[in-house]
Amino acid sequence: MRAAYFSSPGPCRSKNEDGLYLGEIIVDRDMLAPEFGEIQSRALVAVADGLGGGPGGREAAFIVLTKLSELALLPFSFDAQNLVAQNLKNAALALSMVAKRNPDLKQMGSALAGLWFEGERALAFNCGDCRVYRIRAGFFELLTQDHSLVYELYAHGQIAEEAMAEHPLKNILTSSIQDGSEEPRIFFQEFAFSQGDAFLLCSDGVWEAASRTELENLAAESQPEAARQLARALSKKALDNISFIWLY
């Protein structure tokens, strides 16, 4: 597969608390346009979003991604869900160790979404409000479930999907990988690749600024051009940090 990836503070934020992991590379730099690379048939990719407004969001995102990178050394197996769950539990413990040494970082944390695959087998997972979408025949299917109050309202039919992006409670998470919190709750979905499938992993700054309809309109373009257009659009109107990995 190929990957287009992008990470930026966005037009309204002074710093970027997001991070990306692609195979063996942790991306910690801000970009003006998407970059492109090859992804092996066995790979782990992820987007992390350090909790904004709190202490050490950027540091937390990269601690979680660094911990997650340990899984890339392991073969994808029937035990993949347990391996991810234990890894992210250990990431939360790592954050607690850092916060214990530096009380200014107390309650540091991060949201995360990832995709781990080998051959035709794949596992999508997330904690918080980062997402994984599958793109099939031009349609975006959400493979993960947000851990947030607004997602619970949506899941119970109390608000429309489009309302989540502008709801006043949109930033309240019900789970994250965080110092001092209960064990993170991870959502998992295992599935098989189909020929032609593509995927979008993103932080909440992306899906809040670009609706599913807008994303599907972009998908009518070639995948590389769609990624370029998405980055340009987000760089003009996003209210948060914007980071994504587009696999195709």
Image (cartoon, rainbow, N blue to C red):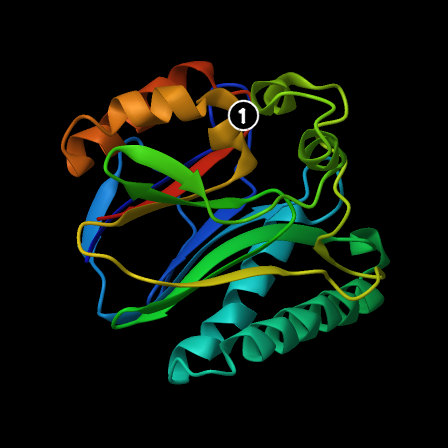
Q: Quadrant of the N terminus?
A: bottom left
Q: Mark 1 is on which residue type?
A: Glu
Residue 179 coordinates in the image, percent (x, y): 79, 61
Drawn side of residue 80 relative to residue 244, left or right: right
Of 26 and 237, which appears nearest the observer?
A: 237
What residue is shown at x 49% (from left), y 30% (from top)? 207
Secondary structure under the numbered disc 1 in the rendered image: helix
Drawn side of residue 67 relative to residue 60, left or right: left
Of 33 and 114, which appears nearest the observer?
A: 114
| Vertical relation: 16 (above or below) 238 | below
Residue 86 coordinates in the image, percent (x, y): 64, 77
Residue that sits furthest to the front in the current view:
157
In which image quadrant can residue 178 be found? bottom right
| Vertical relation: 156 (above or below) 79 | above
What residue is shown at x 85% (from left), y 58% (from top)? 103
Residue 56 in sight in this render: yes
Q: Which residue is mark 1?
A: 208
What residue is shown at x 41% (from left), y 40% (from top)? 141
| Vertical relation: 236 (above or below) 34 | above
